[in-house]
Image (cartoon, rainbow, N blue to C red):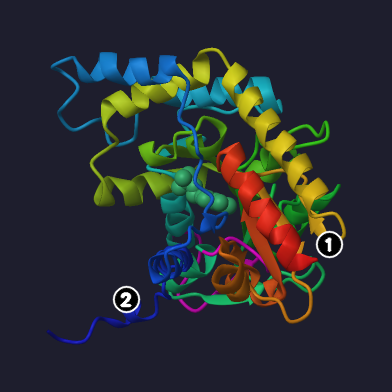
Amino acid sequence: MREAPERIRRLPQQYFTALLARVAAAAADRGDPLVDLGRGNPETGPPGHVVKALQRSAARTDVHGYAAFAGLPALKEAIAARYLEVYGVELDPAREVAVVPGSKTALMEFALCAVERGETILLPDPGYADYPSAVALAGARRASFVDFDSAEGAALYLNFPSNPTAACAPPGMFAAAVQWAHRTGGTVLHDFAYGDLVFDGRRPQSFLAVDGARDVGAELFSMSKSYGMAGWRLGFVLGNTDVVSRIELLQDHLFAGIFRPVQEAGIAALTGPQDSVEERRATYERRRDRALAALAGVDATSEGTFFVWFRLPDGMTAERLLVDHRVAVAPGEGFGDRGAGFARLSLAVSDETLDAGLERLATALA
Ligand SMILES: Cc1ncc(COP(=O)(O)O)c(C=O)c1O
């Protein structure tokens, strides 16, 4: 076989693929059980009425062909109605909403749709490990976003609440991003995957709620975290009509729509009872409180998401936690240079697993 083409060779190894392999190897290594707080995979599924909607739809005979490429209009209307109700943002479902097979796909598509080869994309550091993959796929250059005064680039990724730092957007951040985009002509993508998971009485803050945001950028909304539907692969790109139409064009070539029962279950999730969203949020907040109490004395924070970001004491590493203390966490350096010396633990595990992991961490970090 010939060597892989350059666009494949420049893709880095995927951070979580590597992490899962490392944790599995460490688990196989010795007999004693390992506690895995490394992955961010929602531990419970969607509410029963969503699963029933999928089952009802899949039992029909007329839903198994190719779905409409751009997604069901009723699904676009459902997410637009939710945006209005929860975030106070009015969207035109026909022009300002694209349906995507998960926001992971969309953050790749955005890079392809927003910049030319060789242009610079600014990324948060530390930031979600798939953003550099999107930059690589687009043949773009990557630079760390530091502040808006020094930010030079054709596109900017933002992510609040943040994976991995679990920080919410500082006041004025989104407005400054809109100003930056107007000044430089750059395009903004706000990844809102954890939008509903905010703690301590904070209100979810959509980028699109800021004046002028949709003129310069788009937001990703994911069904994975708010509704426990990570395996279903359903999300949205919302806002700027150019970004939305470019993504729909690209998807017309890449995919043949999303399985209609998944879309209909998505409508059920978005338009049905919303108590499960608040229950999920409250569960993670309670676990966050437990984690911070167990790690008293450690520099650890979490304002939202289902993660806690913490500083490792001198001499300690995620690898040592794994090998010597049998607890897996996500190493901070995998999220960017400025993540070195930190690690991320996940609250998306059972209470028993969390308690077992916290006990080991408290001993190891003391
Ligand atoms: C910050 C961030 N963005 C996007 C995603 C991808 O989510 P989805 O399941 O919608 O593809 C994740 C998943 O962990 C994430 O943490």
Determine whether 132 is above or below 88 in the image: below
Ligand 1 near label 2 (Cβ, under 8 Å)? no
Image coords of residue 324 (percent x, y): 59, 73
Q: Quadrant of residue 263?
A: top left
Q: Which mark is residue 195?
A: none
Spatial CA span between label 1 and label 2: 39 Å
Disc 2 marks a residue whose amino acid type is: Ile
Q: Nearer the viewer, mark 1 or mark 2?
A: 1
Q: Which mark is residue 8?
A: 2
Identify the residue position indicated by label 1 in the image. Answer: 299
Provide the residue span drawn in magenta. 113-129
Q: Residue at x 32, y 82 (%)?
A: 6
Q: Residue at x 50, y 66 (%)?
A: 115
- The question of residue 172 being in magenta is answered with no
On-image quarter of the C terminus: bottom right
The residue at the far front in this view is: 31
* Quadrant of the snapshot with the N terminus: bottom left
Up the image or down, 259 lies above or below 51; here it is below
Q: Is residue 119 magenta?
A: yes
Q: Residue at x 64, y 69 (%)?
A: 332
Ligand 1 neighbours mark 1 (CB distance < 8 Å): no
Task: Write down the quadrant of residue 146 in the picture.
Answer: bottom right
- The residue closer to the viewer here, 346 or 34, is 34
- Nearer to me, 284 or 30: 30
Going by the numbered disc 1, the residue's amino acid type is Asp
Q: Is residue 159 visible?
A: no
Q: Secondary structure at mark 1?
A: loop
Residue 133 at least partly seen: yes
Q: How dense is the environment of label 1, judged by Cα within 10 Å: few (below 14), some, or many (20 and up)?
A: few
Residue 27: x, y in percent? 43, 64
